Image: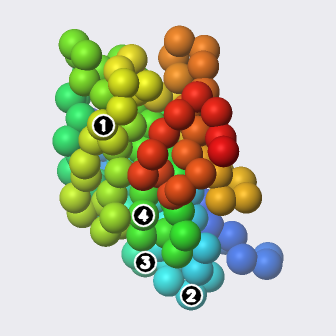
Amino acid sequence: EGGQLKSTVFSCSEAMCTWMRVHGGTGAPKVRLRPDFARSNVAYAFTDHHLYRSSDVWGFSRIETPWPAESRFRDLALVGSGDTLFAAVHAIADAEEGLYRSDDGGATWSRVRSPLFRQGAASISIADGRMLVSLPDKGLACSSDGGRRWSRRCA
């Protein structure tokens, strides 16, 4: 449509579905919902290079991110109420780390400073208060304190 690439996300509740466009996205975006999605309508969608946020049922707006454009956005995890986000980014130029954190729903980001993430991060899982991040060199990084400290094993 008009030379712009678009992706679509469908949101369904019981038997009714609505669709939301992800402008500038290509392919099928991955979606993460805030725990209070039914009330807030806040959802996140991401493609290989971009992150989007929706706060209504009409569409997603792109969130500016600090990682280099040639990086690949691999995963997004919402922690707690959903305002704290962790982004797994892979194939970053040079030796920049590849796990990013936002404590304000994606408005600002900081890189997680740990040697474990020098080659980037591939995926994030959260269970029982622990976070596991898969690393491109086939290892895992673990945090038992909400992402403040990281190690190869969970305490």
Quadrant showing the N terminus: top left
Q: Which-is-in-front pick, marks 4 and 1?
A: 1
Q: Where does the image place residue 30, in percent across and percent down from the top left?
A: 55, 45
Q: Which mark is residue 39?
A: 2
Q: Where does the image place residue 103, in percent across and percent down from the top left?
A: 34, 64
Q: Are marks 2 and 4 in contact (CB under 8 Å)?
A: no
Amino acid beneath label 1: Arg
84 in relation to 16, above or below: above
Judging by the rendered image, the residue that carries numbered circle 3 is 56
85 in relation to 74, above or below: below
From the viewer's perspective, tell me whether residue 77 is left or right of residue 129: left
Q: Residues within 10 Å of mark 1 (few under 14, many from 20)?
A: some
**Which callout, 2 or 1, points at the residue further toward the start of the chain?**
2
Q: Which-is-in-front pick, marks 3 and 4?
A: 4
**Which callout, 4 or 1, points at the residue further toward the start of the chain?**
4
Q: Which mark is residue 149?
A: none
Q: Nearer the viewer, residue 19 or 99?
A: 99
98 in relation to 66, above or below: above
Judging by the rendered image, the residue that carries numbered circle 1 is 113
Q: Are marks 3 and 1 in contact (CB under 8 Å)?
A: no
Q: Are marks 4 and 1 in contact (CB under 8 Å)?
A: no
Q: Which-is-in-front pick, marks 3 and 1?
A: 1
Residue at x-position 45% and y-position 46%: 149
Q: Are marks 2 and 1 in contact (CB under 8 Å)?
A: no
Q: Is residue 49 visible?
A: no
Q: Where does the image place residue 100, in percent across and percent down from the top left?
A: 34, 43
From the viewer's perspective, tell me whether residue 94 is left or right of residue 144: left
